[in-house]
Image (cartoon, rainbow, N blue to C red):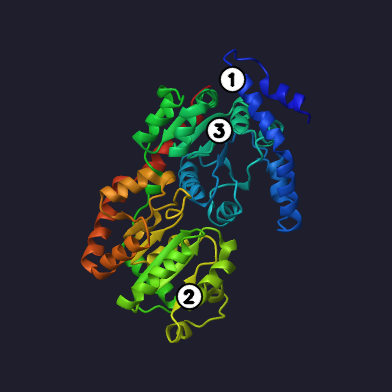
Amino acid sequence: MSVSELGRGVMGKSQGDGSELLYAIYNLALNGATPFIAIYMLYRLMVMRKGWGAVKNWFGDMPKPSSNGTRKRIWVHAVSVGEVMVAQALTKKLRELLKDAWMILTTVTDAGNAVARRQAKEVNAIAYLPVDYYWSAMRAMHAVRPNALILIEGELWPNIIRCAKRSCAAVVLANGRVSDATYQRALSYGQAFYRAMLSQFDVFLMRTEVDAQRIVSIGADESKVVVTGDIKLDVMPLDEGELKLLRRKLLGEFGIGENNLVWVAGSTHHGEEELLLEVYKRLLIHFPSLRLIVAPRHIERSNEIATLIARHRFWCVRRSSIIRGEIEPRAMSMAAATPVFLLDTMGELRNIYALADVAFVGGSLVKRGGHNMVEPLAYGCPVVFGRHVDNFRPHAAALQSEGIGFTVNDANELFDLMVRLLSSQTMRSEIKRRSKKLLEAHSGAATKTAMHIAKLLMSPK
């Protein structure tokens, strides 16, 4: 499609408010990125050997709903693993309320797609999000014919949103958040475009009052904004019996003794593993039985991290080797070299936190915006993170105010905090009690969100 055709497709009827010009500029910029998208597509096909499935989805070739015309058709989009977990909780509640609905879940990342295929049992189809060209978005809408497009957290794709509205779908932001970066960008130079895009939404179901205030200030209609709570905090803590069974099972698989202390470092990035291993060396002097499990955010970095672990003179034990039966648990417990466990499998981190006496959540000591620091709370363990938590600032503030989350700025602060936490069973027990109390206070967010969506779908147009 030519640039002029693209512009005509996007502009349609003029709204007379300048938004059409903004959309045209956006589409011209996106069209300019086409060569880079094509290069990545070829790299994916020829080097990564990923197959045509994602590429077909990118250009609007989507799974089609069954022929039953009375079923509600719901398109849920979650960018990656953390958002997929939110989508999973939400679609489970939607399935209870709308038993006959046809649901599709899309992702951007491969990791998110893999987790969705493994765990999102309530949906009828799983695919990748189309590239945000107007023509590919409209082609996807013609295939799916959604009654509702539900975007999880901060996923704002201008053409997909606009095409959904032009296909008569309700557009919903669920578990909505406005990150520091998005807020500053919108206020600095993008408010007109955000206002035009947000005008397409039917309802904004926001995590917190802060997120609600922010989205109104960047252009959302205040009458459409509802605070429904944070679905990521809508996690029921495991009861003691369930936790003991899960922990015993995993300890046996990893060859870790009941009396060992365990430190789980989840969603780590380049630049963090080196620091963690240095701190771990120092901690072993004080806690010889301490074991470290490293779970990188991107498992394709596993070989790099395995080399780093060996360079620090630890025995790198891969989770995949344990699963394949290549390493006996007894061999790990009797090894002369201290093992450092590398979680090189997808979708397991949440359960692995059951082993943790202390959890570190990565992407926070380096400038990556942080990752989901709520998952460890289901198991009641203290959560440690760096100061770079822009994407999870409300969660970080909540955890810190309750005395169950802790910020560190560097290796020395991390070491000092770890010594305090590992030395005091009393402190860890109190944190476990407070974690349970916090999660109970946020229970029901997924149900509230689903009920608002169901009400919107069932109301007469």
- Disc 1: which residue: 19
Q: N-terminal of the two: label 1 or label 2?
A: 1
Label 1 neighbour load within 10 Å: few <14, some 14-19, many 20+: some
Question: Which type of secondary structure does the marked residue at label 1 adopt?
Answer: helix
Label 2 neighbour load within 10 Å: few <14, some 14-19, many 20+: few
Question: Which type of secondary structure does the marked residue at label 3 adopt?
Answer: strand
- Report the number of discs: 3
Tell me the residue at 58%/31% (across/down): 147
Residue 337 drawn above or below residue 165? below
Label 3 neighbour load within 10 Å: few <14, some 14-19, many 20+: many
Tell me the residue at 36%/37% (across/down): 208
Q: Of discs 3 and 1, which sits in the foreground?
A: 1
**Gap between marks 2 and 3, in whole Å?**
52 Å
- Disc 2: which residue: 312
Q: N-terminal of the two: label 2 or label 3?
A: 3
Q: N-terminal of the two: label 3 or label 1?
A: 1
* CB atoms of marks 1 and 2 within 8 Å: no
In the drawing, does residue 342 fall left or right of residue 434? Answer: right
**Residue 25, how many percent across, how many down?**
65, 26
Tell me the residue at 24%/68% (across/down): 425
